[in-house]
């Protein structure tokens, strides 16, 4: 993993909110099969992370509760500084195609898909423990949260 140009706030206290002074993150690529996430600036990898996924990691998300992480192109569309998973960045799932697929199956598409940290109360020590989200360590999430802005595209590949 490359070095992050993030600086913690305050000399005496630890804060989950960090500053980032590096190049603007213009895209995120997630490769589910390799359990990797890349933060990019104009196609160049700035940071890479090992990730955990939904508890049913193979295949695209089709409906609420299937435990899968969606595949496709989305946007980072919201931030939650008070997430029960340390910090989180919302992914714009479901899109129109996702809603149509779920409707064809007669099920709701679900939602609330995030990149987030982990909380020991939820993580069981197993890989791929989320309900469809992308998880990194809390420390890594602090950096990702500082680096990624709303509107950043994210490509989630099989």
Image: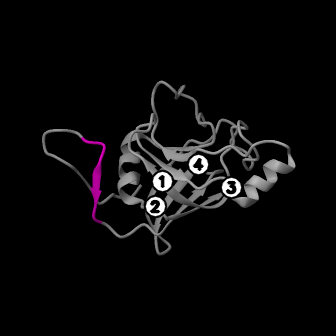
Mark 3, mark 2: which one is toward the viewer? 2
| Residue 111 in which image quadrant | top right
Residue 124 x %, y % = 54, 25
> In the image, what residue occupies the spot 73% across and 38% down?
66
- Element at badge 4? loop
Mark 3, mark 1: which one is toward the viewer? 1
> In the image, what residue occupies the spot 22% across and 39% down?
14
Q: Residue furthest left?
A: 12
Q: Which residues are magenta?
A: 15-21
Q: Is residue 119 left or right of residue 132?
A: left
Q: Is residue 92 left or right of residue 144?
A: right
- Element at badge 2? loop
Foreground residue among 127 and 105? 105
16 falls in the magenta region: yes
State the separation of the CA atoms marked 4 and 3: 13 Å
Residue for badge 4? 35
The first of marks 3 and 2 along the sequence is: 3
Residue for badge 1? 78
The first of marks 3 and 1 along the sequence is: 3
Residue for badge 2? 150
Residue for badge 3? 71
Graded by Cα atoms within 10 Å as few (under 14), some (14 to 19) or many (20 or more), the crowding at tag 1 reads some
């Amino acid at each position: 993993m490359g070095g992050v140009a993030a600086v913690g706030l305050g000399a005496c206290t630890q804060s989950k909110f960090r500053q980032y002074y590096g190049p603007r993150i213009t895209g995120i690529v997630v490769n589910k099969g390799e359990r990797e996430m890349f933060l990019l600036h104009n196609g160049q990898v700035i940071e890479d992370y090992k990730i955990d996924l939904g508890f049913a990691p193979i295949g695209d998300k089709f409906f609420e509760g299937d435990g899968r992480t969606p595949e496709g192109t989305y946007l980072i569309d919201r931030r939650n500084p008070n997430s029960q998973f340390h910090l989180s960045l919302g992914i714009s799932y479901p899109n129109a195609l996702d809603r149509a697929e779920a409707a064809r199956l007669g099920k709701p598409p679900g939602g609330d898909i995030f990149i987030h940290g982990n909380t020991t109360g939820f993580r069981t020590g197993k890989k791929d423990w989320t309900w469809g989200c992308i998880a990194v360590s809390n420390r890594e999430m602090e950096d990702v949260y500082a680096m990624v802005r709303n509107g950043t595209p994210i490509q989630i590949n099989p």
